[in-house]
Amino acid sequence: MKRHLAAILAADVAGYSRIMADDETATLATLKSCLTEVVEPQVGQHGGRIFKTMGDGFLAEFPSVVEAVGCAGDIQRAMAARNLRAATLPLLFRIGVHLGDVIAEGDDVFGDGVNVAARLQSLADAGGVRISRQAYDQVEGKLGVTYRSLGEQTLKNIPRPVGVYAAEFGGDGTGVAAPALKQEIRYCRAPDGARLAYATVGQGPVLVKTANWLNHLELDWASPAWRPLMHGLAREHTLIRYDARGNGMSDWDVDDISLDAWVSDLECVVEANRLERFPLLGMSQGCSVAIAYAVRHPERLSHLILYGGFAVGSKHRGLNAEQLEEFAAMRTLTRVGWGADNPAFRQMFTTQFMPDATKQQMDAFNELQRQSASAACAVRYLEAVSDINVVGLLEQVRAPTLVLHVRDDVRVPIELGRRMAAGIPGARFVAMPGRNHILLDGDPAMARFLEEVRLFLG
């Protein structure tokens, strides 16, 4: 066995299990064709060699990291062109590249250099390329490629955090092979007549997201606060999300804003999309909506994912006199200043949701909140959220459940997430680094969240 420094490229097919389930014969034939017609020629032209193929991907070694990253871009470009052909089963690779120490034994290669590349690949979007800081230091300015820092990431089974960069060959952070994402917005009516807006976007298996604090389907999709997470979820799923009553593109003037009404809204959206069985994602107070739905309709849920949530609102947390006074003051300030041109009133929410945001992200979220609801609706939301209590439902959840929370969440303390997870039979709890309640582009928790969801849903 010999040690040496090498650039390792790891790649797999995004959504391989689903594609195989749809048509095993066609998928195997298409992957073989892609390896023969696209991958092998590109690896050879860049001076590399494929040392291992798996059922859904391959590993390649290069003497130059510049060549490895260049090869990754050329593979994605060639795949993009191939996927445009008529009557072609489209496949999208996820690629990771790392420069590190490896061990050679015969024709095979082992070691941390290989392991890190494989973990980077799992962080990539469909059609995207992720590289390590070690690779970035060598390729910066040499390929005419834009690189976007994703910060230090904690990779599974890798002892130290790794700096990660998105190689933006296509200028959008997703390589060049990912299809453009365009959402379609439709409407349905709740039993009490409230008109609800819902959006469908992406491709692949369905993932339904419950509504949460003051969503707006159109503005969220373009916002620097919500866009990276929504696009990340839609890259490998048909993402269905909606604006709950009282905000966004749904009716604002409604009689009932409560947990029961929010669950009814979710039921309406599910029926409108004729869904029989699907995974459900709840975020923030949307976790309580998801839990209540899971108990009402256990036959519908294949998986339950809860992020940044809680089972009890502030009214049921035994607040002291000072905390109760603070809540009353927040409610008054919201009623008086919510719609003002000066964002100072909304800023108090923004700094809780995303304390580490850039000025651009904070300004965008301030404006998003103003356009998503009236002052009266925002106050009603605050009161309804504070009155949530689904503790008695937790033990009745039957779906496999993944609970995630950032360790230093300013808006919703992690202990609330731990308690929620502890009450759900068999739930797995994942603590992630960070302080932002809303996961932002570049947050270490963003990539971890998407990877955990991907692994959980298979």
Image: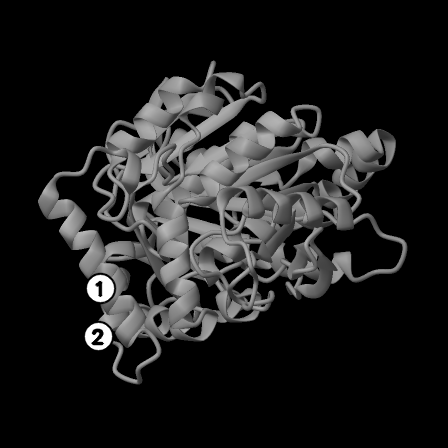
Up-down: is 165 above or below 181?
above
* Furthest residue in direction bottom, as rendered: 341
Q: Which mark is residue 344?
A: 2
* Residue 215, horizontal then vertical, whole percent: 49, 61
The quadrant the C terminus occupies is: top right
* Residue 268, horizontal then vertical, whole percent: 70, 48
Say left or right for 80 vs 413.
right
Q: Secondary structure at mark 2?
A: helix
- The residue under the point 36% across, 61% down is 379
- The residue under the point 36% across, 40% down is 308
Up-down: is 320 above or below 182?
above
Inter-mark Cα distance, 2 to 1: 7 Å
- The residue under the point 37% across, 75% down is 367
Q: Residues within 10 Å of mark 2 (few under 14, many from 20)?
A: some
Say left or right for 182 vs 417.
right
Residue placed under numbered mark 1 in the picture: 348
Q: Nearer the viewer, residue 407 or 326?
A: 326
Answer yes or no: do the residues labelled 2 and 1 have beta carbons within 8 Å? Answer: yes
The quadrant the N terminus occupies is: top left
Q: Which mark is residue 301?
A: none
* Residue 42, horizontal then vertical, whole percent: 62, 51
Q: Nearer the viewer, residue 373 or 401?
A: 373
Say left or right for 76 vs 455.
right
Q: Amino acid at mark 1?
A: Met
* Furthest residue in direction left, as rendered: 322
Say left or right for 59 vs 201.
left
Q: Secondary structure at mark 1?
A: helix
- Residue 410 in sight here: yes
Q: Quadrant of residue 184?
A: bottom right
Q: Residues within 10 Å of mark 1 (few under 14, many from 20)?
A: some
Q: Quadrant of residue 73?
A: bottom right
Up-down: is 111 above or below 128?
above
